[in-house]
């Protein structure tokens, strides 16, 4: 009985140590950006434009962000492929906080979310807390350059890819729970405007779901991912257009 309590308390201590270590890692990695006047430069400002536009619509014009006169002389906001208004975790932050603090909270918050989710994912296969911490940093490494470059969509989406894997690979959950959880996470990825990540995540998640030969898991995953269809509002006008031919679909909206 005493040994069991000791082992339980030791696991709790190790868990707290792992969580605190990853949060400190996030703060250390972002320390220079956190103390600077604004988070960063590079692509930060261009990626902020859709956010600035819908903030302007709601906070200053007091109207829903369907149209803006700030984008190419006036365009439907949803026609912008980087429009992430439907991703509520960031939208609420952008509307509540000033732009500079909103950037800090969105970037740092999603980095911590990714690290802690990666730790849970690593915990499905690893026992040692040091191994979990190391694996969490490695699994989160794809978005570390995005923090510097100001690629909001990559930062906001990666944790959801990892969480989808947590659901899908956790055999302690029922098939429907695993499928719905993984599907919803997969569907959230395009809502962050991470169009490439949505494609790559689907290539990863869907064949993995099929590999279990559990059709309840597969179909529930497909149903959960339907939330991602909301993103078609943003990108349907781009289908068949190349990036160098952006003028064609921009001019489509007078």
Image (cartoon, rainbow, N blue to C red):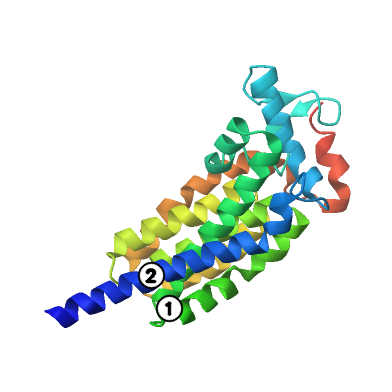
- Residue located at (77% from left, 44% from top): 37
Per the model, the C-alpha gap separating discs 2 and 1 is: 7 Å
Tell me if 75 is positioned left or right of 199 in this view. Answer: right
The residue at which mark 2 appears reads as 15
* For the residues bearing labels 2 and 1, Cβ distance under 8 angstroms: yes
Q: For the C terminus, give its image quadrant.
A: top right
Mark 2 falls on what kind of element? Answer: helix
Kindly tell me whether residue 151 is visible in this rendering: no
Residue 130 place in picture, x, y as percent: 47, 80
Give the residue at the far top of this rendering: 62
Whether residue 173 is visible here, answered yes or no, is yes
Which of the 4 quarters of the picture holds residue 95? top right
**What's the mark number on residue 94?**
none
Q: Considering depth in this image, is 167 or 106 the residue closer to the camera?
A: 106
**Viewer-nearest residue: 134 or 17:** 17
Q: Residues within 10 Å of mark 2 (few under 14, many from 20)?
A: some
Q: Position of residue 51 (x, y in %)?
A: 70, 36
Q: Secondary structure at mark 1?
A: helix
Residue at 80% from the left image edge and 23% from the top image edge: 69
Q: Which mark is residue 129?
A: 1
Residue drawn 66% across and 57% down? 154
Percent x, y for residue 61? 69, 17
């Amino acid at each position: 009985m005493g040994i069991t309590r000791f082992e339980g308390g030791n696991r709790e201590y190790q868990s707290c140590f792992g969580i605190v270590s990853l949060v400190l890692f996030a703060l250390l990695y972002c320390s220079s950006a956190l103390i600077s006047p604004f988070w960063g430069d590079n692509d930060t400002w261009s990626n902020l434009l859709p956010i600035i536009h819908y903030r302007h619509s709601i906070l200053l014009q007091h109207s829903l962000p369907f149209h803006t006169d700030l984008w190419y002389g006036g365009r439907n906001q949803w026609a912008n492929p980087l429009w992430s208004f439907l991703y509520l975790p960031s939208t609420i932050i952008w509307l509540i906080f000033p732009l500079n603090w909103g950037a800090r909270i969105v970037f740092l918050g999603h980095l911590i979310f990714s690290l802690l989710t990666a730790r849970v994912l690593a915990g499905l296969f690893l026992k040692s807390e040091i191994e979990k911490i190391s694996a969490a940093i490695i699994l989160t490494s794809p978005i570390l350059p995005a923090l510097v470059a100001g690629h909001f969509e990559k930062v906001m989406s990666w944790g959801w890819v990892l969480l989808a894997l947590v659901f899908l690979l956790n055999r302690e959950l029922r098939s429907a729970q695993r499928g719905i959880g993984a599907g919803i996470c997969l569907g959230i990825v395009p809502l962050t405007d991470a169009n490439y990540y949505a494609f790559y995540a689907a290539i990863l998640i869907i064949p993995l779901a099929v590999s279990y030969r559990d059709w309840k898991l597969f179909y529930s995953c497909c149903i959960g991912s339907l939330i991602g269809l909301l993103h078609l509002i943003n990108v349907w006008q781009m289908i068949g257009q190349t990036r160098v031919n952006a003028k064609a679909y921009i001019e489509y909206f007078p």
